[in-house]
Amino acid sequence: AKLLPPDITKPCCVRVNTMKLDVDSALYELGKQFKVQKDDMIRDLLVLPPHTDLHNHPLVLNGSVFVQHVKFGFYRILLNKYEIGKVQGFNLTKKVCSAKGKASSMVAAALDPKPGWKWALVLDACSAPGNKTVHLAALMRGKGKIIACELNKDRAKRLEDTIRLSGAANIEVLHGDFLNIDPKGSPFSKVSAILLDPSCSGSGTAAQRLDHLLPSHATDVVDTQRLNKLAAFQKKALAHALSFPAVERIVYSTCSISQIENEDVVSSVLPLATSNGFQLATPFPQWQRRGLPVFEGSQHLLRTDPVEDREGFFIALFVKKSSVKNSEE
Ligand code: SAM
């Protein structure tokens, strides 16, 4: 099914890197040029008018504000391949404010690491380019430690660039395969929270949603075979995350809208999650869009809509039963 292109008439969001600048100062600085306000749900998020172009703004260049760019890279390759060139209405080379500012910022916030958290060690399992890693670092106010694992060498370099730009000093990059980490080995036996944002089809992103502009034979990238292959990895990775002995919170997220990569992945690991003492918790209970009603408990899951929210994201939060009471305090 073809989806609508991104609704670029909707406001966009940027995240203030609170390791470098506080939210009120960013609001003041950006307010000199733009109509800007705080997001009503995510503390470090600012909402700007549609089309705001911040990519050359000094606050972005110095890492005080993070713009999570529209994923046009992959799409541009396809466009070149089919020589379509510039698609009417979308300047694909220009990074506008952000099509996924809010949805992607909800992921680290759902893990909800707090400064002075008793959990000092957080693992970002699939971390490049590192937007969520540095968001975690900001939420932890530089306390504790984050291990950022990334399989791909080039992407690990991008991760290091992001970390450098953010100014975070508590992130260690681990270039390797998350699936090869021994959960019982040192220091992983002490990991208390995991953010798992694995490779996915990206079907909730603006770039993928432009696929209706491509010749039909180019769109087989979203076929079921590919989704099943991705889901097989996602299930393995989530089951692996559930096996870390000290972990109390796990966020599983994708920027896909496919049930195969989302609800189906979560439901497939539920028996293991339950036997390891986890239950699904409800990230952002005030958020209306929840999981597809395909299994009991899917109301805990969070979805964002590719058009209404400018990007389709999926978030599941697993919490160790023994820690539920503490985290609610
Ligand atoms: N969380 C990142 C962010 O917000 O910037 C985006 C992560 S991206 C969706 C998934 C990443 O996982 C890719 O960079 C990919 O190379 C990496 N990856 C895939 N398989 C992996 C594995 N087995 N172990 C570690 N990283 C892996």
Image (spheres, grey):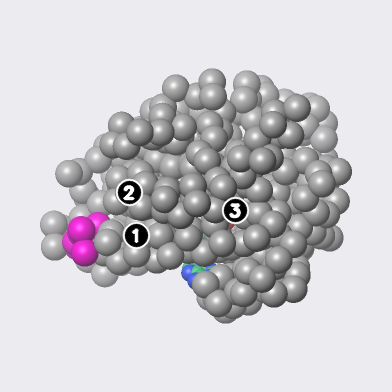
The residue sitting at 52% across, 72% down in the picture is 179
Which amino acid, mark 1?
Ala
Mark 3: secondary structure: strand
x and y, in percent, of residue 300 in the image: 46, 32
Closer to the camera in the image, 286 or 24? 286
The residue sitting at 49% across, 47% down in the picture is 274
Tell me if residue 220 is in the magenta stretch. Answer: yes
Q: Quadrant of the C terminus?
A: top right
CB-based contact (under 8 Å), mark 2 and mark 1: yes
Which amino acid, mark 3?
Leu
Q: Quick one: label 2 or label 1, which is nearer the N terminus? A: 1
Q: Which residue is mark 1?
A: 231
Q: Quick one: label 1 or label 3, which is nearer the N terminus? A: 3
The nearer-to-camera label among 3 and 2 is: 2
The residue sitting at 74% across, 73% down in the picture is 186
Q: 10 Å neighbourhood of mark 2: few (<14), some, or many (≥20)? A: some
Q: Is residue 86 visible?
A: yes
Q: Which residue is mark 2?
A: 264
Q: Is mark 3 within 8 Å of ligand 1?
A: yes
x and y, in percent, of residue 17 in the image: 75, 44
